[in-house]
Every structure is written in structure tokens, then in C-alpha cells.
Amino acid sequence: MSRGEWRGGDGLRRGVYVLPNLITSMSLFAGFYSIAATYNGSFERAAIGIVVGAILDGLDGRVARMTHTTTRFGVEYDSLADVIAFGVAPAFLSYGWALSAFGRWGWLAAFLYLICGALRLARFNVQITTAEKGKFNGLPIPAAGVFVASMILLYYDLGGSGSYKHWAVLLTIYVLAFLMVSTIKFNSFKDLEPFRRRPFNTLVVFVFLALLVAAEPQVMIFVFGASYIVSGPVGEVVDAIRRRRTKHSESGKPVHGHDTHTEDPR
């Protein structure tokens, strides 16, 4: 996330950091471009705009942390940009592409996605100093927006054209809205420092993934997006199973050196 300069009460009079906020502005423009493209019926271009916005959204945070320009102004500006680029734009795009055919259930799904995304961002800003390190509380709105875009890019890559009506799209939007306001944990990947020493095998994996994305970008963006969304609920189930096993193993331990199952009740 981008950061501007806000030090004390006169922070804004001192100015803002240009570079990270410029990147955030470019992400905001990508969201506006997506809305305009949807209005003109260019759904594929609208989806590309959301993906570009997500790349810029991730880049501004990296730049801010690397240049030590992380401040409160940038957090607020980044959130406002995210509401447009990954809230309004995907909601408008999904409604124009598929949801309008479902009547009231369609516009309700699009609005629910938007409001849940806005609530997700507001909660993130409130919990930014208390959140678990390396984890997001709920599905990040950029990930939700990219997945909406990836569905459309995959649809066109498979030979589709124009709008598309299928109940799976309607269900997906409702699920994304729920995941954004849920308490399910998702990996933030903020601990992945590009300039830190890594094992050689890690480099090979990243190069291989980059080649896959370059060869089949529409397919791989959808696969990566779906994998990330599924990783949250699957991780919660795995953690619940581990906690249950730990609880059972602790309850079965001997008490005061005696086996709880063979101890004389007298």
C-alpha cells in the first residue's frame, strides 16, 4: 500500500511523497479506465484495467516500504483508490457482463460486493496496527477484483464474446463478498523480500511460474486467483483439525505420572 507524508498536525503542509502516491494515482486511473471500458461494452479491456491496477497497487506498497515513505496519508489515499479500482470497477464490470441478466438478484450481488469491499477496507485501516503479521483478516479487495477480472479474461480466451449469463457467476460474486467481510485468514505475502538471499530452487520456481504466466496469462491469472481464494478456507480447516488433534493429545496425557485411563478411581 502506498504512503504519503503526514507528520503531526502540519504534515500536509510539509507535502506528500510523490512517487508512491503517483503509483497509487495510476492504479486509480486503471480503475477509472475499467469503468469507462465497461460502459462502452469492452469487457475484456475493462478486465485488463483491473489487473493492471492490482499490479500497481502491489507496487506502490513495495516502493513505499523500500523508500521508507510509509505514512498515514498514503494509507487513506490507497484505500480510496482501492474502493474505485477493486470495488466499483469489478462490481460495475460483473453487472454489465453477467449479473444484469438476473434482475434484482444481479444488481443486489454487485452492490453487496461493493459494500463488503468498502467495509473490508475500513476494517483493515482500523486494525492495521493490531492485525496478525503476514496475514490478512478476510479476503483482500484487490484479490477479489482480480478474480472477477480473471473470469472475464478466461471467458474471452476460451472463445466467448459479449455478455455471459450463468448462475455460477452470480454465486461467485456473493461468495467473494462474504469472504471479504469474513474473519478467514489469508496470506499477505509481505514477507517476500525480492532482494533477500533465497535458495537456488526458489529462483527456479519463480522463473518457471513467470514463464507459465507469459505463455498463458489468462489461464494462469485465473488459476492463481482461484488458488489464493481457496487457500484461506482450506487453511482455516487445516488449522481447526490441528487444534483438535492437539487438544485430544493433551487431554490424553498422564496426570501426575498416572495414566488417566487406568488410574484407580478410589
Image (cartoon, rainbow, N blue to C red):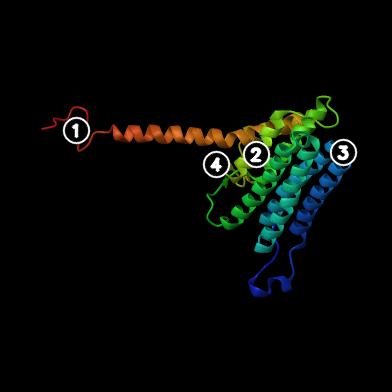
Dot 2 amino acid type? Leu
| Residue 50 on image: x %, y % | 77, 43
State the CA–CA distance, disc 2 to disc 3. Answer: 23 Å
The crowding category of the residue bearing disc 1, from other C-alpha atoms within 10 Å (few below 14, some 14 to 19, many at least 20), is few
Q: Are marks 1 and 3 in contact (CB under 8 Å)?
A: no
Secondary element under disc 1, as helix, strand or loop, is loop
The residue carrying mark 2 is 176
Residue sticking out furthest to the front: 104
Q: Earlier in the sequence, mark 4 or mark 3?
A: 3
Q: Are marks 4 and 2 in contact (CB under 8 Å)?
A: no
Q: Earlier in the sequence, mark 1 or mark 2?
A: 2
The residue at the point 75 percent across, 58 percent down is 21
Residue 7 as seen in the image, left or right of residue 50: left
Foreground tag (4 vs 3) = 3
The residue carrying mark 4 is 184
| Residue 113 on image: x %, y % | 68, 43
Q: Earlier in the sequence, mark 4 or mark 2?
A: 2
In front here: 26 or 161? 161
State the CA–CA distance, disc 1 to disc 3. Answer: 73 Å
The residue carrying mark 1 is 258
Q: Are marks 4 and 3 in contact (CB under 8 Å)?
A: no
In front here: 210 or 112? 112
Dot 4 amino acid type? Ile
